[in-house]
Image: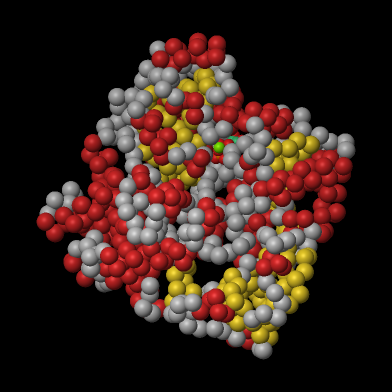
Amino acid sequence: MYLPGVGPKKAETLLKEIHVVSWEDMLYYFPYKYIDRSKIFKIREIDGNMPFIQLKGKIRGFEQVGEKSSRRLTAAFYDDTGSIELVWFRMLKQIPDMYKPGVEYILFGKPTLFGHRFTVAHPELETENKFYEGEVGIQGQYNTTERMKNAFLHSRALQKIIVRILEKTPSPLPETLNGEIMDTVRVISLDEAIRNIHFPKSADWLRKAQYRLKFEELFYLQLHILQVTKYREKRLGGWRFERVGDFFNHFYSHHLPFELTNAQKRVVREIRKDTNTGKQMNRLLQGDVGSGKTLVALLSLLLALDNGFQGAIMAPTEILATQHYETIGRLVAGLGIEVALLTGSTRKKQRETMLPNIQNGEIQILIGTHALIEDTVTFKNLGLVVVDEQHRFGVAQRAKLWKKNRIPPHVLVMTATPIPRTLAMTLYGDLDVSVIDELPPGRKPVKTFHMYSEKRKNLYESVRKQLQEGRQVYIVYPLIEESETMDLKNLTEGFEIIREIYPEYKVGMVHGKMKAADKEAEMQKFVSGETQIMVATTVIEVGVNVPNATVMIIENAERFGLSQLHQLRGRVGRGADQSLCILLTRYELSENTRRRMAIMTETNDGFVIAEEDLKLRGPGDIDGTQQSGITLDLKIADLARDGQIVSLARDVAYNILNEDPLLEKPKNKLMKLQLDKLNRQRQMGWFMIS
Ligand code: ADP
Ligand code: MG
């Protein structure tokens, strides 16, 4: 489609980088922040709770400080009322050439208190004349990628395109909510909202525009989710697991290595009920790391077997699949159950003998990676699929499983990412949720300490004691894309240092840039105890079980989000011995980071941590570079912050569907059209089930 002032080359860039094809797409590409160009603050006026603000002043004295990963560039910024500190973590070489001391700049950024001093990280600085070119009032800023900037599609250019579109489109823009809803929830019209989200008449209009657009987005999301749920309830029949038979009973009475926790029992009951309704089960099982999800999975699989079906477990990595295979093989030994492992590295020959046995039903439990959903794998009668560590599996892959049978298998998705319940309802509105909220008895909670990097000498000595007792140790480094080369260097340097400190022990290393096979091999050495220390990036985050590993050291812990720290910590504390987790950070930390470290040392409860994580995460937080993994492609609403709008949208959507399930009434026609349109668009595909 033709966009005013956009040639074919720019159009292609817009499509590739931000999926903008039409005028409408462009109008729905909202600013990610706003600058109030009407107000310039004095440094003296700054307090700790300010959003992004403008200051006017000069720069003095660039200086590089810190070592290695904490290396950064600082400078003072002052006006006639005081001074603050500017800090950069990237482009340390280029920055001093870009700005001249003594020249007056307009600074834009968010001040944060470090110790006694206000700091602005990665400020935007512009000379005054450049800045005033036609900009007054509240100005939207648009996110752009490197490629877009190279094609001269920076924030200002996008703004100009939007101005032209708004001039040329008929006014008012067609409404997407009917009058009844607009009255009930008191929102402004779409036309007013779109115009004000891009060019706010005032702060008040901006708020109204945001509210309207957030509501609209969440409302259609809820409408969609609720409809899918209803559809599933109505249409998708499922296998009936009517009996609890010998496999389940025999295992339960004679092979259980320990008494199930009450939470495990409850979840098994929920699953039993679910699989006997004649409808397909779609259940999300949330349980903190170490809560014993594997056993629940196995019991569910035995239920499938008792009813004459096959079962499968799908894991995100080979190492996890292999671990499941070994664990489950051990647990069901002697029950006469055929268990097989199928992964990317299964030999061709072995594969060829395995495939017919999957097809004829001889193999009863198949465990594996993505390899399971390849088209060549056909089952005789797949009754239940367990998907482990769900956040690495897309919904599309789940959907592919549906096609393996005439009747879809029951699906149990297991995740250790603790998602607050309200959020889970929105994210996984299409799934029923079970929670294991209790750890097996006798677990010693991991003791967590926060230490400054400079004091690491003592740490190495206490770690040696653990090693001498035969324990194993993880040392984790951050790795983010922006500073990849630097990070890799830190990792390999860290690896060398550790080897020097502990010459008597074997040290392994894994990171995401290694070939999958090498990674697996290195991991396997650690699992088998051949290596005692594992230096790694977050690739070890998910699922591996090495009960003998009792120490987790996290380097540059300030660069991890709360959920990720918790996830990493979950790698230790899996055996009977007391485990330790040490968070190493630099000395100077933002308030937010201090809080994160404090929460980690105070609690082991994944749900508490998840809630705190949602509260603490905020835009523009430079510490929060590695986020929690809860992502959803929303344009304007924020599930963590807009909880009230979420429930409002849910209520309104629920009432409408209750009265008119298929949106057939004339007054709902508008919404039906809009929903169909959104469903056709890509971003909603995320939620599609079948
Ligand atoms: P996760 O939920 O993280 O996948 P696992 O299923 O790997 O946890 O279980 C962690 C450990 O706890 C395993 O070693 C397992 O044998 C043990 N475990 C599971 N359930 C119980 C229980 N009810 N009592 C004691 N130990 C248990
Ligand atoms: Mg697990």
Count of all numbered marks drawn on residues in the image: 0
The quarter of the displayed image where residue 593 is located: bottom right
Residue drawn at x 70%, y 62% is 94
Residue 134 image point, x, y percent: 45, 77
Vertical position of residue 185 compared to residue 229: above or below: below
Quadrant hosting ligand 1: top right
Residue drawn at x 65%, y 38% is 513
Would residue 238 appear left or right of 441 to someone viewing this image? left
Can residue 254 be seen here? The reply is no
Which scheme is used to colour this image of the protein?
secondary structure
Residue 594 image point, x, y percent: 66, 65
Residue 299 image point, x, y percent: 46, 30
Can residue 279 be seen here? The reply is yes
The quarter of the displayed image where residue 321 is located: top right
Q: Nearer the viewer, residue 337 or 637?
A: 637
Residue drawn at x 52%, y 15% is 351
The quarter of the displayed image where residue 187 is located: bottom left
Residue 303 image point, x, y percent: 41, 27
Vertical position of residue 43 compared to residue 62: above or below: below
Q: Residue furthest bottom?
A: 80
Residue drawn at x 72%, y 29% is 525
Vertical position of residue 22 compared to residue 508: above or below: below
Would residue 265 appear left or right of 689 to someone viewing this image? right
Q: Quadrant of the C terminus?
A: top left
Q: Nearer the viewer, residue 32 or 536?
A: 32
